[in-house]
Image (cartoon, rainbow, N blue to C red):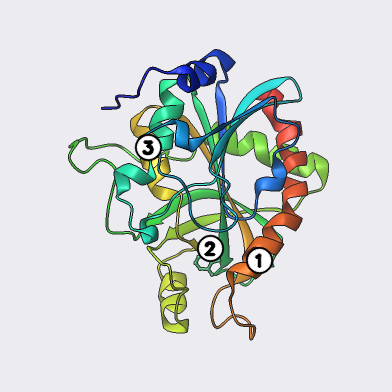
Amino acid sequence: MFDPPIGDALQQLRDWNAKIAIILGSGLNAIVQDPIESIDYAEFSEIPKPRVPGHAGKFSLCEIAGARVIFAQGRVHLYEGYSAGEVTASVGMLSNVGVKKLVVTNAAGALSEKFKPGDWMMINDHLNLTGTSPLIGWPEFLDLGNAYSARLQKQFCDAARKLGIVLHQGVYAAVVGPQYETAAEVRMLQNLGADAVGMSTVLEVIQARALEMEVAGFSCITNLATGLSSTTLSHGEVLETGHKAANDFSRLLGETLPNL
Ligand code: HPA
């Protein structure tokens, strides 16, 4: 299914021998501290380079509390004109270099009235409203019954409680974008049972599950969705709130990663 080039960059990723990778969404780059090495996505012909501000476009090799991890800093989106296969190419690459556990993060708008900007929501299920799948062309009837690992959810939950970090749980709805939702769409998503809305993640999760990776997902709530607040939505606001919330998530990773 996945046919990478054999080159120095790939060998470097493989030699790092990380079993855990973390994909960072908009504005969450501050989570990466003191990387031992960074490898630009441009080194891999099948991974498109992100163009959206806040998405760096590189793999960073880090050690967190003794655990080797690969951060995928930035992603590409359907709304940039990429296919589901291109959007998920980095997941195939991570699997190919030996990653078994994938933590996906994103910036999302709150649909639940309980959430406020700067909070984190652990994703316990998703609605794929993108109209596509990375498995198109690879007819695999994948079971998504436990797309988000119950084991990992418990570990992150326990860690958040111990650290006193608010960690909501809920359903993430993925839309194509790039426009934000109308107020009517927000009501629809609430009625469908979603707690947060964003423009990424679900295709990566589907691809990761197809490659038998264990998955955890997190939404950084960067804003209240349209109609739930009177402020105008902007990508600048999303980046700024993401940056502030990064500190909580770093602490959560420090507590959890050694036990994953
Ligand atoms: N809607 C969709 N995607 C988003 C939002 C939102 O309100 N905030 C950050 N990403």
Could you say which quadrant of the image residue 208 lies in? top left
Q: Nearer the viewer, mark 1 or mark 3?
A: 3
Image quarter hosting the N terminus: top left
> Circle 1 sits in a helix, a strand or a loop, which is it?
loop
What is the spatial separation of the Cα atoms under label 1 and label 2, in whole angstroms? 9 Å
**How many residues crowd around disc 3 within 10 Å: few (fewer than 14), some, or many (20 or more)?**
many
> Circle 3 sits in a helix, a strand or a loop, which is it?
helix
State which tag comes first along the sequence, 2 or 3.
Answer: 3
| Kind of residue at disc 1 | Phe
Q: Which residue is mark 1?
A: 115
**How many residues crowd around disc 2 within 10 Å: few (fewer than 14), some, or many (20 or more)?**
many
Q: Residue furthest bottom?
A: 230
Q: Residue at x 64, y 68 (%)?
A: 236
Question: Closest to the observer: 19 or 35?
Answer: 35
Instruction: Assess whether mark 3 and mark 2 are in contact (beta carbons under 8 angstroms).
Output: no
* Mark carried by residue 94: none
Q: Residue at x 76, y 57 (%)?
A: 244
| Kind of residue at disc 3 | Ala
Q: Which residue is mark 3?
A: 89
**How many residues crowd around disc 1 within 10 Å: few (fewer than 14), some, or many (20 or more)?**
many
Question: Closest to the observer: 34 or 172?
Answer: 34
| Kind of residue at disc 2 | Ala
| Residue 41 drawn at (x, y percent) | 48, 36
Q: Which residue is mark 2?
A: 196
